[in-house]
Amino acid sequence: MPRTATTLKAASTDAPRRSGRGRTPSGKPNPIDVHVGARVRLRRTLLGMSQEKLGEAIGLTFQQVQKYERGANRIGASRLFDLSRVLDVPVSFFYDDMATDVSQQSPRMIAAGLYDGDEQATFEADPMTKRETLELVRAYYRITDAQVRKRVFELAKALANASEQG
């Protein structure tokens, strides 16, 4: 009996549904893609570059840059290389400071049984993803006098220590 469009459609809906390419079973972006995107955003912001300007430099719209920065869209190897050139960092920069729990949440690694995968891991806890942190770092590096900058750094550390103790 030949298959018709109706039987093909029915057959395709009976198959178990897979999560989107590189996404977690719940449909969220791959945590590694989110980390890489956050590092793109961090470097772009530290350079004072807009999403639009970055997009122009690599031939993308600012909306695509936004999706990369959120981890909603994956960044291919050649695009990551282009980003490293425009943002003046090595490709490894985008993977630096990746927490072990993030690196162990790759949907493919979990599916292969290599990691347990914790769906509840939150990226909001990472201070490097907060605008306040980025603004603080940019302001800090705008201090041209190295001695003053060092004093501000020491003051911030002292305040943090006092806050933890009191």
Image: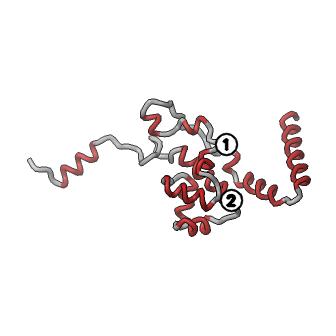
The CA distance from mark 2 to mark 1 is 19 Å
Q: Residue at x 58, y 52 (%)?
A: 37
Q: Residue at x 46, y 45 (%)?
A: 23
| Viewer-proximal residue among 25 and 111 | 111
- Among the 4 quarters of the image, the one containing residue 125: top right
**Disc assigned to residue 85:** none
Question: Label 2 belongs to which residue?
Answer: 45
Q: Is residue 98 above or below residue 141?
A: above
Amino acid marked by disc 1: Ala
Amino acid marked by disc 2: Thr
Q: Is residue 91 above or below residue 86?
A: above
**Quarter of the image with the C terminus in it:** top right
Name the front one of labels 2 and 1. Answer: 2
Q: How many numbered badges does the structure rendering display?
A: 2
The answer to whether residue 152 is left or right of residue 46 is: right
The answer to whether residue 120 is left or right of residue 125 is: left
- Among the 4 quarters of the image, the one containing residue 65: bottom right
Considering the numbered disc 1 on the image, is that residue within a helix, a strand or a loop?
Answer: loop
Q: Residue at x 66, y 54 (%)?
A: 42
Q: Residue at x 51, y 34 (%)?
A: 117
| Viewer-proximal residue among 129 and 25 | 129
| Classed neighbour count for the residue bearing mark 2: other residues with Cα under 10 Å, few (<14), some (14–19), many (≥20) | some
Considering the numbered disc 2 on the image, is that residue within a helix, a strand or a loop?
Answer: helix
Tell me residue 64's x, y (percent).
52, 62
- Among the 4 quarters of the image, the one containing residue 32: top right
Question: Label 1 belongs to which residue?
Answer: 125
Tell me residue 51's x, y (percent).
61, 64
Tell me residue 74's x, y (percent).
49, 52
The numbered mark, 2 or 1, whose residue comes first in the sequence reads: 2
